[in-house]
Amino acid sequence: MNKKMTAEQVKELIGQEGTRTVEVTVIGAKQAENGEVDVRVSDSMGEVYWTGLDNIDLYR
C-alpha cells in the first residue's frame, strides 16, 4: 500500500534571509582591471560557481 505524503508551505519563513556555511575549494580566479577578484569555487554540496573574493574566508 502506497501512502501519499503531503506537505504544507511554512509561509512565515518565505522571504527570510540567512547564511549557510559550506567548505569550498578554489578552482579558478580572475582579477579585473579595477582590482576586484572573482573566484570559481566547488563547494561541499557539489555546486560549482563564481563568487567574489570578499564573500568567502580562505585559510591554509
Image (spheres, helix red, strand yellow):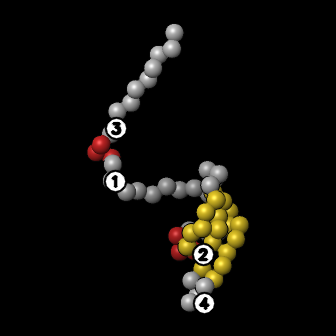
Amino acid type indicated by mark 1: Gln
Which of labels 1 and 4 is toward the front? Answer: 4
Q: Along the horizontal axis of the image, is 13 left or right of 27?
A: left
Q: CA distance from mark 2 to mark 1?
A: 27 Å
Q: In this figure, which residue is indicated by the disc labeled 2?
A: 38
Q: Residues within 10 Å of mark 2 (few under 14, many from 20)?
A: some
Which residue is labeled 4 in the image?
33
Work out how far the residue at label 4 is from the one at label 3, CA to CA, in angstroms. Answer: 46 Å
Secondary structure beneath dot 1 equals loop
Name the disc covering residue 9, or none.
3
Is residue 36 at least partly visible in the picture?
yes
Secondary structure at badge 4 equals: loop
Task: Give the labeled residue for mark 1.
Answer: 16
Q: Kindly check if marks 1 and 4 are in contact, taking CB atoms under 8 A apart as contact.
A: no
How far, Cα to Cα, is label 2 from label 3? 36 Å
Percent position (x, y) of residue 35?
A: 58, 87
4 or 3: tag closer to the N-terminus: 3
Q: Is residue 60 visible?
A: no
Task: Please report whichever mark, 2 or 1, sits nearer to the chain's N-terminal start.
Answer: 1
Q: Residues within 10 Å of mark 3 (few under 14, many from 20)?
A: few
Q: Secondary structure at mark 3?
A: loop
Answer with the quarter of the image where residue 29 lies.
Answer: bottom right
Element type at mark 2: strand
